[in-house]
């Protein structure tokens, strides 16, 4: 702390590392918008850096001083009329997202685990080719990596598609989804 008060930027960076998450969580809990919480948190640290020489050890911790600064910035934000008119682009984009229900998340998890199980039932080489392809690896790179020809890669992918399409577990999952 004394080094930071003496102007050592690295020491202040260590204070930021130690308390940044706490201050951010405090602000985010009160404002509920990620971009606004980030802005207010960074404003709080700028304010703290400028006023670092006024901090004295009393009965409270440096983190408490930072949270007090953050609390005041949040209060100022809500007191200003600006917060009622201002809508960030991030908020607009976030509002277009459809929030998934817990049921949808669980169903997707079952589908993913069913697909993983079906892939694991494929023969080893076919499974490796399919995983690499699913990860976006070009056919030529798969062939080179596995020491097989590109046409063999395509054959493995074709056979994997056929086996996955005929897999009873995946067929059942597809029926229940439709």
Image (spheres, rainbow, N blue to C red):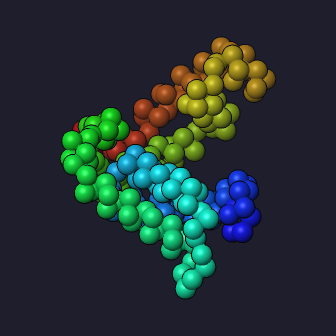
Where residue 151 sits, quadrant-wise, is top right
Residue at coordinates 63% horizontally, 20% vertically from top-left? 138
Residue 107 in view in this figure: no
Where residue 59 sits, quadrant-wise, is bottom right
Which of the pair 52/156 is nearer the observer?
52
**Residue farthest right in this picture:** 147
State the quadrant of the C terminus.
top left
92 in relation to 61, above or below: above
Which of the pair 124/128 is nearer the observer?
128
Q: x, y (%) of residue 168?
A: 40, 43
Which of the pair 156/53 is nearer the observer?
53
92 in relation to 22, above or below: above
**Residue farthest bottom in this picture:** 59
* Residue 126 located left or right of residue 91: right
State the quadrant of the N terminus.
bottom right
69 in relation to 133, above or below: below
Residue at coordinates 21% horizontally, 49% vertically from top-left? 81
123 in relation to 53, above or below: above
Q: x, y (%) of residue 62?
A: 58, 72
Residue 100 in view in this figure: yes
Q: How many marks?
A: 0
Where residue 97 sits, quadrant-wise, is top left
**Residue farthest front in this picture:** 54
Q: x, y (%) of residue 67?
A: 46, 68
Residue at coordinates 64% horizontally, 63% vertically from top-left? 15
Residue at coordinates 50% horizontally, 74% vertically from top-left? 64
Which of the pair 83/111 is nearer the observer?
83
Q: x, y (%) of residue 21?
A: 53, 61
């Amino acid at each position: 702390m004394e080094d930071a008060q003496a102007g050592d930027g690295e020491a202040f960076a260590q204070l930021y590392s130690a308390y940044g998450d706490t201050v951010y969580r405090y602000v985010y809990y009160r404002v509920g918008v990620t971009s606004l919480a980030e802005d207010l948190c960074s404003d709080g640290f700028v304010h703290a850096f400028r006023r670092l020489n006024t901090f004295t050890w009393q009965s409270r911790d440096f983190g408490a001083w930072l949270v007090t600064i953050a609390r005041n910035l949040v209060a100022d934000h809500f007191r200003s009329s600006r917060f009622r008119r201002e809508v960030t682009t991030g908020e607009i984009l976030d509002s277009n997202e459809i929030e998934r229900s817990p049921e949808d998340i669980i169903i997707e998890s079952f589908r993913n685990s069913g697909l993983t199980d079906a892939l694991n039932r494929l023969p080893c080489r076919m499974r490796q080719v399919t995983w690499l392809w699913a990860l976006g690896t070009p056919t030529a790179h798969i062939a080179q990596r596995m020491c097989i020809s590109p046409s063999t890669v395509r054959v493995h992918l074709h056979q994997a598609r056929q086996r996955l399409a005929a897999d009873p577990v995946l067929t059942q999952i597809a029926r229940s989804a439709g």
